[in-house]
Image: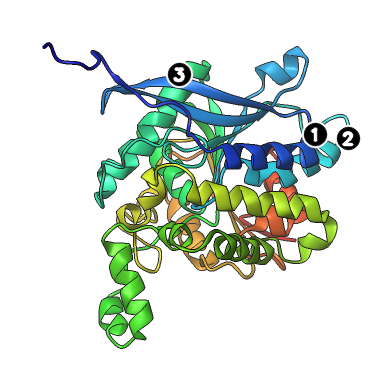
Amino acid sequence: MGTCGTRGPARYSAALAPGCREAEQRLLKSLLPNADVFDTAVDLASPRCQVSIHSIEVNFDGNSAASAVPLVCLPGYGTGGAIFASCWKYMLERIFEPHGPLERRRLIAIDPLGMFLSSRPPWTPGVDVTEAESWFADSLEAWCKAQGLQEIDLLGHSIGGNIAAAFAERYPQRIRRLILLSPAGLCPEPKGYREKLRNAPWRIRLLFRFWRRGSSPMMLVRCLPRKRGRQLCSRIVTRWVGKAASTMDSDTVAALADYIFHGWTEGRESAGCVLGALLHPGAWGKKPLAGRLPELKIGQLEMIYGERDWMDVRHGNEVANATSQNIDRKHPTVVVQLIDAGHYAHVQAVPAFCQALLNALSDRNAASTWST
């Protein structure tokens, strides 16, 4: 009997996550009813395979919008592209023409490879930071080619900021502006940090041990009874949204909680294991961005933090100071701190975040630090 199998590259279809897809539809129906959703097949060279990258897009009619550089958004760890729906809604109503000063452009949010509704191939990088960066940067580059995008403005939140910076470093020709929202992994692990951890409570030591080995915190939710898992995700989303919950209807908040729950629990875990690859416990960078960002050969770098962010704005200011020494950089690095916002400013403080994004996407930056 002959062998059975396939020749050529392996193929990984869009994630089989019906609950996540249904929750995304509910969320978009509430906030962005005119948004389009796509699953784009892209070919990767290493490993040689075909994968599907999921994206949410808002397109405008007209030649000016079609010719404008698009804004591509990468979500943070444990979230998908639909997390940007609230701020996009605000921008469409207040920021973009004809309601505001910003030229209309294509808006795109993608689920990085291995997360939420993109393909979930086996996570091969383990805890190797270089391999992990290649996993995300190369798949994003393949997606840009498939989309015919020559140049983009790239925004990344938290670990999405880490991924965005790695992409800009490898493919600087693609980047006009790089906007990092509460980026993770800026600084190296401080000296003596591991010694201090030896005196930490045993639960913290156990958590960090699993982190170093590449385990995902989503495993906890997967192991819980379904009802308990839903309750936990609901509490997490309530904390993320904060005071902004008063401006959202209960169905929208429930849809966001379901989106997170199903995104964490459906399908293969895949890139959910990325924490131990990119970051040391405590969110210290394995390949710290602080020394890499000033050397990027891109047009402009913007960094946005919340006042109550667990990412330290002082690290962003240090990057801005280092960047000012780079005579090849045409624009200074702008660091923004948003008052009364935390790590999830794009859902907690939507008006302030969108104002900062307006400044980042325009050419009117006059100061190196701005607060609202």
Q: Distance between the residues labelled 1 and 2?
A: 6 Å
Which residue is label 3 attached to? 145
Quarter assignment of residue 12: top left
Q: How crowded is mark 1: few (under 14 residues within 10 Å), some or many (20 or more)?
A: some
| Quarter placement of the N terminus | top left
- Label 1–label 2 contact, CB within 8 A: yes
Q: How crowded is mark 3: few (under 14 residues within 10 Å), some or many (20 or more)?
A: few
At x 42% / y 51%, what residue is drawn? 325
Quarter assignment of residue 57: top right
Q: Indicate the position of residue 279 as horizontal and vertical percent values.
A: 35, 58
Which residue is label 1 attached to? 96
Q: How far apart are marks 1 and 3 (CA)?
A: 27 Å
| Figure coloring | rainbow
Q: Indicate the position of residue 63 as horizontal and vertical percent values.
A: 74, 12
Left or right for 39, reference 162: right
Question: Which numbered disc, 2 or 3, marks the residue that appears first in the sequence?
Answer: 2
Residue positioned most to the left = 1
Q: Which amino acid does label 2 sit on?
A: His
Residue 76 seen: no
Mark closer to the observer (2, 3): 3
Left or right for 141, reference 131: right
Image vertical order of residue 202 relative to residue 280, above or below? below
Image vertical order of residue 254 relative to residue 35, above or below? below
Residue 191 seen: yes
At x 50% / y 54%, what residue is drawn? 158
Q: Indicate the position of residue 353 as horizontal and vertical percent values.
A: 70, 52
Quarter assignment of residue 322: bottom left
Q: How far apart are marks 2 and 3 (CA)?
A: 32 Å
Q: What residue type is labelled 3?
A: Lys
Which residue is label 2 attached to? 99
Q: How crowded is mark 2: few (under 14 residues within 10 Å), some or many (20 or more)?
A: few
Task: Determine whether the residue tagged by mark 3 lies in a helix, strand or loop.
Answer: helix
